Amino acid sequence: MLTLPSRLALLLGLALVLQLPARAQQKLLTMEDAFLNRSLQPQNLRQLTWIPGSNDEYSYVRTTGGQDELVRGAATTDKLTTAVPVAQLSAALKAAGADEAKAFPAVQWLNAGTLLVTSKGQVYGYTVATGQASKLLAYDPAAENVEMDPTKTRVAYTKAQNLYISLAGRENEAVTQEPNPGIVNGQAAHRSEFGITKGTFWSPQGRKLAFYRMDQTMVTDYPLVTVLPVPAQATPIKYPMAGDKSHEVTVGIYDVESRKTVFLQTGEPREQYLTNLSWSPDEKFIYVAVLNRGQNHMELKQYDATSGAFVKTLFEEKDDKYVEPQHSLLFVPGKADQFVWQSQRDGYNHLYLYSTGGKLLRQLTKGNFVVTEVLGFDAKGKEVIFTATATDGLERQIQAVGLGGGKLRRVSTAAGTHAGTLSPSGKYVLDNYSSSTIPRLIQTLSVATGKVGATLLTAPNPVEGYALGQTRLVTVKAADGQTTLNARLITPPNFDAGKKYPTVVYLYGGPHVQLVTNSWLSGSNLWMQLMAQKGYVVFTIDSRGSGNRGRAFEQATFRQLGTAEMADQLQGVDYLKSLPYVDQTRIGIHGWSFGGFMTTTMMTRSPGTFKVGIGGGPVIDWRLYEVMYTERYMDTPQENPEGYAQANLLNYVDKLRGRLLLIHGTVDDVVVWQHSLDYLKTAVDKGIQLDYFVYPGHPHNVGGKDRVHLYHKITQYFDEHL
């Protein structure tokens, strides 16, 4: 007969046995899962797009029975039809001279019945109705920066420093014949600041091509060394550092028919920034936002596209800190003399309706929110459709506002982060959205009513069955005592409020970046969830200086990068220390790029706050960073020597307490290797010990399979020292 203690032991043993299957289902993430396992990311739809010229139909690629197929559906129904099976497309392409396609290739619609497929520099047209394909044009397979014109009959591309075009009967025609590699044509200028993403700009009908010509001959060569060949080779780049001579940019206009090029007469000074290039609908004019090197004075200028002559200045924008134009003009359908302009002039990025005469007709949006993207115009051309922040920047909502003025109107309604694509008719929007609890939901919404027309995807929880901790959105007061900061807190699975946990703070803190959102997992990644599984609390706060909270929020760091951000991060630390389960003696910090700068800042300008820090690709001395970015936020070193000295982390090396690991890619062309090497040299000179690791052959970010190695290194360092 069992005694009471024996029976209790048996019951407890049975209870544990009964729990084993349930706990076995709670899988643990691996580092490979966190970075390489795509099945753990929310499901999406491949090549989802509207079909031009259709009756508001969309298409995407799906896999059925192991075979890819392109399916299409209407905005008002969930019914799908197979438009093109991959085997059928592959056979047609092969008959036309292309390689066999086992997976569905990247395609785009020329019209409602014709697909365009590009393979090894050959552009093929595939007719859906007949299942036949034919070659339309070709260009050099080694081409870079390829851009097709709006009519899909011409291609612009670059090779080395020159620009070329291809069209039927005129393949691989040189637009420029520049022998000097220091003068680059057709590539993104100004180191891709000011919203610049490319270097070629086709006119609406493809009759003319605008392009950047960037003269870098006056910029000092900066040596990068690749160790992959034997012996190692120097591969210098042009890298204009803050306060130094910058490159000089002009804009060329190539007339496809006459084969002549003219250059816009943008004048002096040569060191200015030309951005937001926009064609008039009739192709007669080019509009350019011309920004001075000081970045505090912008002029929107009009130029004649035939002669390159300056026509007039439509308006100017000035700010005592900086002006940052980032968006092209958006002309109103049917009104070639009206366009929508985006500006932060009233403190938040908003929409303004202008005439081409330069007259402000009205401000369309106003309030304490940021317009993040303009999607287009409604079916009648009476409303502009856009996405904007909501809930203190945590959300993105699709909205509409009348060009004639009036109140804003919500198109999307569910809480979360919405991204929209407007149909060519302007009647429907493809709404791809997530929230902290919804992995992904893709629907069509009526622009007029906001009602759901079709549901294309309800993604399942990709980490169902994994032992994840609780992820919460919280708020913290900024160091100014007034501003509310958004933060994210992840606690371990099987959390015990009576225990003390080590904590890792992940941060960025710099301009244009927002880490905390009401999106899937609140914007966290699976490495953060893996760290929670290992028993860490993981915390992130978007300090002043980060993105999507308005001009004053961003400009709080002006001329003193690192100072206001540090004060706000310390407010986050105070919040963590108020939590009884956070071990105040075991708090670590990690970030990359600007986050690497902030990690090193926190370890040395607030010594002792963090036990362990890991800074990747860190800016150490802003004097060594690029002209366009640095001078916007810091002015030049000559104008702001005190600010540069205060932010220069070489001045705080001897203040380091705790363990610091710096990591850098050896061919980093964004934050050059010299930053962390200078830090190492200063540490050696001052007898300060720290840890260091490099990734040979990697640029600013360590990508691919080596990213798993990187985060094994980071995790191991926290495990050993935190």
Image (cartoon, rainbow, N blue to C red):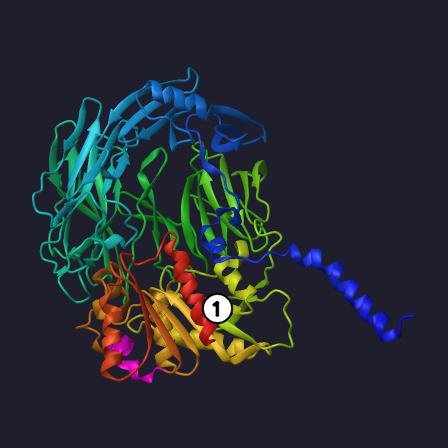
Q: Residue at x 38, y 31 (%)?
A: 107
From where the camera sits, is residue 67 visible? Answer: yes
Q: Is residue 474 above or below residue 362?
A: below
Q: Residues within 10 Å of mark 1 (few under 14, many from 20)?
A: many
Q: Is residue 353 magenta?
A: no
456 relative to 274 in the view: left or right? right
Q: Using residue 233 as the reference point, say whether residue 594 is left or right of it.
A: right
Residue 200: % across, % down: 23, 41
The answer to whether residue 393 shows anywhere in this view is: no
| The N terminus: image quadrant | bottom right
Q: Nearer the viewer, residue 609 or 294?
A: 609
- Taking the view exactly as shown, the residue that stands out farthest to the right is 1
- Residue farthest along the top direction in this orientation: 130
Magenta span: predominant SS is helix
Quarter of image, res 578: bottom right
Element under disc 1? strand
Observer-nearest of 516 and 317:
516
Residue 3: x and y in percent read 89, 74
Identity of the residue drawn at 44% across and 74% down: 569
**Residue wearing tag 1:** 485
Tell me which residue sits at (27%, 37%) in the image. Answer: 147
Residue 96 vertical position relative to residue 162 in the rendered view, above or below: above
- Viewer-proximal residue, 653 or 312? 653
Q: Amino acid at mark 1?
A: Leu
The picture places residue 149, in percent across and down from the top left corner, at 27, 32
Q: Position of residue 365 (x, y in %)?
A: 43, 52
Q: Residue at x 41, y 17 (%)?
A: 131
Report the magenta residues as a range.
643-656
Query: Is residue 652 within the magenta segment?
Result: yes
Above or below — where is 212 with respect to 686? above
- The number of discs equals 1
| Lateral position of residue 58 relative to residue 181, left or right | right
